[in-house]
Amino acid sequence: MAFYEAYSHPALLRYQTSVCTKATLFLLVVLCLTYISPLLVAYRSQGFWIKRATYEEQPVVRFQYQTLLVAATSIRGDFVAWSTFPHLNNMLASNLRIPSVSVREEDQNQDGKLDFLILNLQLPLQPEEQVYSVQLLLTFSYQLFRMSTVVMQSLAYLQHSSPVPGAKLFISGDLKLQQKTPLPHRGVYDIYNMSVIDGSSPFASAYDLENIIGRYRERNLTTVLSCPEPVWIIGPAAGSAFELNVKIRYPVEVISYRPGFWETIKFAWVQYVSVLIIFLWVFERVKRFVFQNQIVSTIPLPMTKPHQS
């Protein structure tokens, strides 16, 4: 039997309510929990607004061929010295000993940056002289380019002493960067691009090791010979030359810097969005769970008619 539509009309239902209702309050609470809670979680994680970041870079290091050597030849305070500064050599007079020096810098991995320095020094001695301690200053040109352009003059200071005289000293270490404050994220940082030792000064105080190291350590950016491994070869060096072998490596450094504004904003936005996605996923799962349970509890069970025979 066929059916046809005799009459139809749409039904429009309108529901009106005021703004200040429990439903509106509930909606505002849900919105706050959804969007403000991730902001608080990201901020309290100590990583929302970064003030310091790090990166890795191998510096461009060049030996400046400026050297100051002091060797104690007795326990009474006698010494011999040598430097690459003419004014200091003139003041040394009879304590001056001019050594034989050979220097080699190598780029081991062929990446265009030098990897280490090898210095060999033969210090001549008088027949009655023996070496009990050695102090050596070496100056370097140190540069960084990845973030801010850092150009500075730095030094490596090494020393070793022994109660018995030695014939040879071997020292191996890394030229490490030391920072007191982070570097800027861009620009040129060249406030320390000046000679560590004033070789033009005619005064002895300019070459005093205590003054040199004291002024140098007041800088915010310095280099230090880290993890030195001295090998002191005991033996008489009388009438011969004391041998000093030094190997200094230029390792990859972890540089601390202050991030720029847009880098900080980008990092904060990524942190916030990541936490927000997690919160939205959790709320969606909870909503589905509650909604499904409510539907199951409100759907009436179907009525079955008794069977009539």
Image (cartoon, helix red, strand yellow):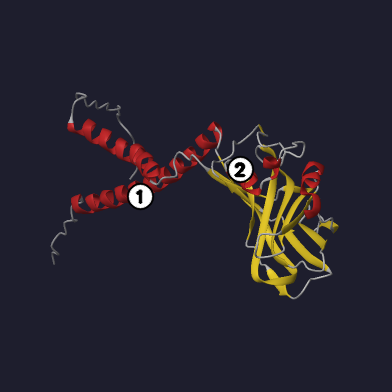
Dot 1: few (<14), some (14–19), or many (≥20) neighbours within 10 Å? few
Using the image, determine if residue 56 lies above or below residue 132. above
Determine the image quadrant of residue 115: bottom right
Judge left or right: residue 43 versus residue 94: left
Question: What residue is rendered at 61% in x and 41% in y?
Answer: 215
* Residue 213 % position (x, y): 62, 47
Using the image, determine if residue 234 lies above or below residue 85. below
Which residue is at the front of the view, 4 or 122? 122
- Mark with earlier residue (2, 1): 2
Distance from label 2 to label 1 (Cα)?
Answer: 48 Å
* Residue 28 % position (x, y): 27, 33
* Residue 84 % position (x, y): 81, 47
Which residue is at the front of the view, 258 or 196? 196
Identify the amino acid type marked 1. Answer: Val
Kindly tell me whether residue 184 is visible in this rendering.
Answer: yes
Using the image, determine if residue 120 lies above or below residue 3. below
Q: Which residue is mark 2?
A: 221
Quadrant for the C terminus, please.
bottom left
Kindly tell me whether residue 145 is visible in this rendering.
Answer: no
Judge left or right: residue 62 versus residue 155: right
For residue 282, the mark is: 1
Which residue is at the front of the view, 118 or 121? 121
Determine the image quadrant of residue 181: top right
Quadrant for the N terminus, please.
top left
Identify the amino acid type marked 2. Answer: Leu
Under circle 1, the secondary element is helix
Question: What residue is rendered at 45% in x and 41% in y?
Answer: 273
For residue 274, the mark is: none
Question: What residue is rendered at 70% in x and 59% in y?
Answer: 78
* Residue 86 % position (x, y): 82, 43
Which residue is at the front of the view, 1 or 207? 207
Which residue is outermost to the bottom? 235
